[in-house]
Amino acid sequence: MVLATEAAQCCASTSEARNLCSVGLSILFSEKGTIMQNSGLPKLVYGLLASVGLLYFSLSYPQLPDPMASHFNASGVATAWMPKSGFFMLILVVTLAAGVPVFVVSKSLAKLPNEKMNLANKEYWLAPERRTETLQYLGIQMGWFGCALLALLFSGLYNAVAANLRPSHTFDSTSFYVALGAFSAFIIFWLVRLLSHFARVPQQNAGS
């Protein structure tokens, strides 16, 4: 009897944890989720990624050979080299490039006339009373794209630096492919979410 009671309590607690997890995920990924729809969060995440990445690369700089391996084949064998100062210039360029979707695209979209925006149901979404909210949504989604892109690029650069710190100078291709797979999965989710958002028009406003 005691075992049955404990088992029931365990099942109940497990079910409750599952429900809490489901609620948390629904809030995180829902259209009005406070996390995914926080306009400042992508900028914060980008800033943290950039700061941590640049700090790591700066601390690694003195330990790297000069020139350093900068290109690798599918087996992880180095096939090209470059001065490490040039490699670190590349890191800065990559960091700035990934910041364009986060900081620049949303402002550029605001300047585009409605006719030049390729958006499903744009008559509804770009109506004067909704245009600001729609552009904010697009800016947030582009911000998350920029964060994911920076994470992928930093993964490749990190593995390149790690390869140069190894005596064999071999690149960990498996690790990078895992990161590439995660990025691809994110992009699929991101695109589906973005397209489905604009494909739907709230029923009560379908005629407006």
Image: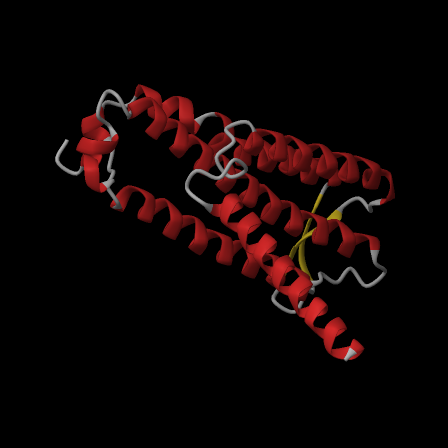
Numbered label tally: 0
Question: Residue 79, position in %: x, y?
Answer: 66, 59
Q: Residue furthest front?
A: 1
Rendered residue at 81%/63% (across/down): 168
Would you say residue 173 is visible in this rendering?
no
Q: Position of residue 137 (x, y in %)?
A: 40, 32
Instruction: Give 21 or 173, whichever is nearer the viewer.
Output: 21
Is residue 29 placed above or below 112 in the rendered structure? below
Which one is nearer the viewer's eye here, 110 or 11? Answer: 11
The answer to whether residue 161 is above or below residue 139 is: below
Determine whether, in the image, residue 188 is placed left or right of residue 162: left
**From the viewer's perspective, is 112 left or right of 95?**
left
Q: x, y (%) of residue 4?
A: 73, 78
Image spot of residue 98 (x, y percent): 54, 36
Q: Residue at x 65, y 45 (%)?
A: 154
The colour scheme used here is: secondary structure
The image quarter containing residue 126 is top left
**Residue 126 relative to residue 208: left or right:** right
Residue visible at 76% across and 46% down?
67
The structure residue drawn at horizontal position 31% and vertical position 19%, both measured from the top left corner, is 111
Front residue of 60 and 86: 60
Q: Image quarter for residue 110?
A: top left
Name above or below for residue 160 compared with residue 111.
below
Q: Is residue 140 visible?
A: yes
Q: Quadrant of the N terminus?
A: bottom right
The C terminus is located in which quarter?
Answer: top left
